[in-house]
Amino acid sequence: MTTTTRPGNPVAAGSRRLGPGALALRQGRLEITQFLRSRESVVFTMGFPIIMILIFASIFDGTIGGGVKFTQYFITGMIATGLMTVSFQNLGIWIPIERDRGVLKRYRGTPMPKWVWFAGKVIMVVAIGVAETALLLAVAVALFDLDLPATAAKWFTFGWVAVLGVTACTLCGIAISSLARTARSGSAVVTPVSLVLQFISGVFFVFTDLPTWMQQVAALFPLKWMCQGLRAVFLPESFGAQEPGGSFELGRVALVLALWCVIGLVLCLTTFRWTTKRDG
């Protein structure tokens, strides 16, 4: 008995036809497996936020005012930068490698719908992001007495800030991957952008201690708003008065992150390339 494969609905010989959900999950498992096989990516993506909080929390063990421990403030930036790393930075570096090696060109030539490849990347980002965040929180609670959100409302805020932030960063990561001309240039394009955003967005420092012009530049990008939304989760409500806008401005956080989701989607649709310029 033989089976046929129709474009847009691939099946393996002797197996039943896979639905869209099964295709996406299979691609997601493949992307996660490939990620875990790269020790450098695993160590940097999963380990960087944990290493940084170990260093900073050990150095700055006091409070930043209002009885808020430095660790309690710093965890918000570490969660945000961790999510940005696994989405924006990871995709911005690895997609050019796949493009340069001809992996994307081969994908485009298969009957598999193109959206399945993108779905696999999203599933990988979500899975690694959840694992990384859970590990980071566990370390902070165990070693530095981090206070977790005490209400369902704060956990809900945590959820939508993370979802909007990861969506925006994932789309922007796919978009910026087109700027790299070769596999080697991906890191050179993405890493400086990521580092600059971390320094100006309140990841390593108290945001209001930064120069005003730096705060204004940071407000143009999603990382600053991810950090601000997470501060509303992990810090007392009274601390919102110390924010530049006089409150945590969760409505504006949602609006800016949603806007960046739209911007990222438009950039993906207009700039993404399956092949290198030399391949045509």
Image (cartoon, rainbow, N blue to C red):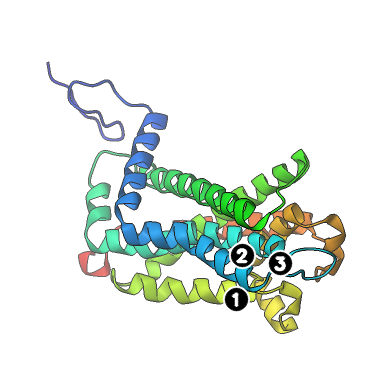
**Distance CA(mark 1)–CA(mark 2):** 10 Å
Mark 1 vs 2, N-terminal side: 1
* Residue drawn at point x = 77 percent, y = 71 percent: 64
Residue at the spot x=56%, y=63% of the render?
A: 81
Q: What distance separates the C-alpha of mark 3 from that of mark 1?
A: 17 Å
Looking at the image, residue 181 lies above or below residue 251: below
- The amino acid type of the residue labelled 1 equals Phe
Of badges 2 and 3, the one in the foreground is: 3
Classify 186 as above or below 45: below
Residue 273 in sight from this viewpoint: no
Furthest residue toward left? 1
| 280 lies left or right of 233 | left
Residue 146 location, x and y as percent? 68, 54
Q: On screen, 55 above or below 18? A: below
Q: Which sits earlier in the primary sequence, circle 3 or circle 1?
A: 3
Three-letter amino acid code at the position of disc 2: Leu
Q: Amino acid at mark 3?
A: Phe
Label 2 or label 3, whichever comes before in sequence order: 3
In the structure shown, which secondary structural element does the residue marked by tag 2 occupy?
Answer: helix
Nearest to the observer: residue 142 or residue 134: 142
Q: Which residue is mark 2?
A: 223
The circle on residue 199 is 1
- Name the residue beneath numbered marker 3: 70
